[in-house]
Image: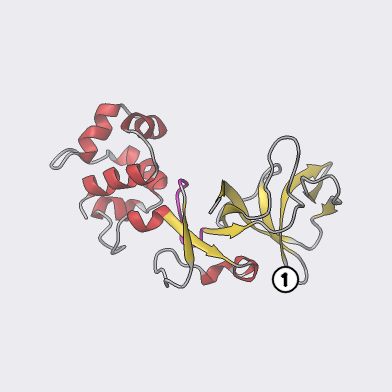
């Protein structure tokens, strides 16, 4: 796939207008139109990293038109919906060589090799104020992102069980906080954060 098609299709997969994409990269709409036009100009080297990051591909794939991915950007518009077990061992997920055994869900965030989606279970993240994640909600998780206090995260406890909570900091200590006040806040302790939630969607049918 040529680089102009890669950018055009990638932008559409993200649901962004030319202007929104231009704003996200930090260029004019006219520049984006040039990039997407057959025979137009390619992004300057100074812009390539940001364009590739938005599309969820490497600079090499952008410059080569995605030829080394086989499927260009379109395959990255969705990620596999996995079980808790697979979320705890996320390296079994490879978006660059999809196995086809997973149901997939559409996303609008950049997708890396191990990005995945997970269905929320239980009501520990249900809140009557602010953010709320009812059972059955689908969350999109990025394992290759450093977690910061305030992020919603997937953590793996000492027994290898996954849990979905908010990471909070009090003093110098980190805690896993449920949004439902009926559940206790627990110290992060031996648990390990294995993913940061990037997106949330609710499937009705």
Q: Which quarter shows the N terminus?
A: bottom left
Image position of 140 with respect to 22: above or below: below
Instruction: Tell me which secondary structure the magenta stretch mostly adopts.
Output: loop
Question: Quarter-wise, where is residue 8 in the image?
Answer: top left
Name the outermost residue toward the front: 205
Q: How is the image coloured?
A: secondary structure
Residue 111 magenta: yes
Question: Quarter-wise, where is residue 35 in the image?
Answer: top left
Q: For mark 1, does the 10 Å Cα neighbourhood hold few (<14), some (14 to 19), or many (20 or more) residues? A: some
Q: Is residue 103 left or right of residue 197?
A: left
Image position of 33 with respect to 163: above or below: above
The residue sitting at 39% across, 40% down in the picture is 15
For mark 1, give the secondary structure: loop
Q: Position of residue 63 (x, y in %)?
A: 26, 51
Which residue is at the front of the view, 42 or 54?
54
Q: Position of residue 111 (x, y in %)?
A: 45, 54
Name the outermost residue toward the left: 39
The segment highlighted magenta reads 108-115
Residue that badge 1 annotates: 160
Residue 87 magenta: no
Q: Is residue 41 left or right of residue 152?
A: left
């Amino acid at each position: 796939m040529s680089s102009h098609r890669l950018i055009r299709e990638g932008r559409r997969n993200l649901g962004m207008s030319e202007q929104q994409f231009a704003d996200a990269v930090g260029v004019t709409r006219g520049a984006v139109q040039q990039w997407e036009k057959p025979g137009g100009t390619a992004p300057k080297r100074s812009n390539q990293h940001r364009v590739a990051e938005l599309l969820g591909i490497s600079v090499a794939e952008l410059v080569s038109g995605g030829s080394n991915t086989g499927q260009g950007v379109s395959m990255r518009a969705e990620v596999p919906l996995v079980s808790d077990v697979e979320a705890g061992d996320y390296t079994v997920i490879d978006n660059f060589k999809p196995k086809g055994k997973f149901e997939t869900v559409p996303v609008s965030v950049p997708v890396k090799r191990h990005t995945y989606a997970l269905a929320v279970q239980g009501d520990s993240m249900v809140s009557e104020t602010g953010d709320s994640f009812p059972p059955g909600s689908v969350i999109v998780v990025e394992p290759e992102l450093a977690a910061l206090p305030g992020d919603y995260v997937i953590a793996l406890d000492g027994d290898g069980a996954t849990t979905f909570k908010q990471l909070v900091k009090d003093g110098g200590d980190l805690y896993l906080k449920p949004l439902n006040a009926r559940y206790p806040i627990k110290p992060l302790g031996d648990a390990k954060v294995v993913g940061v939630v990037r997106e949330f969607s609710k499937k009705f049918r």
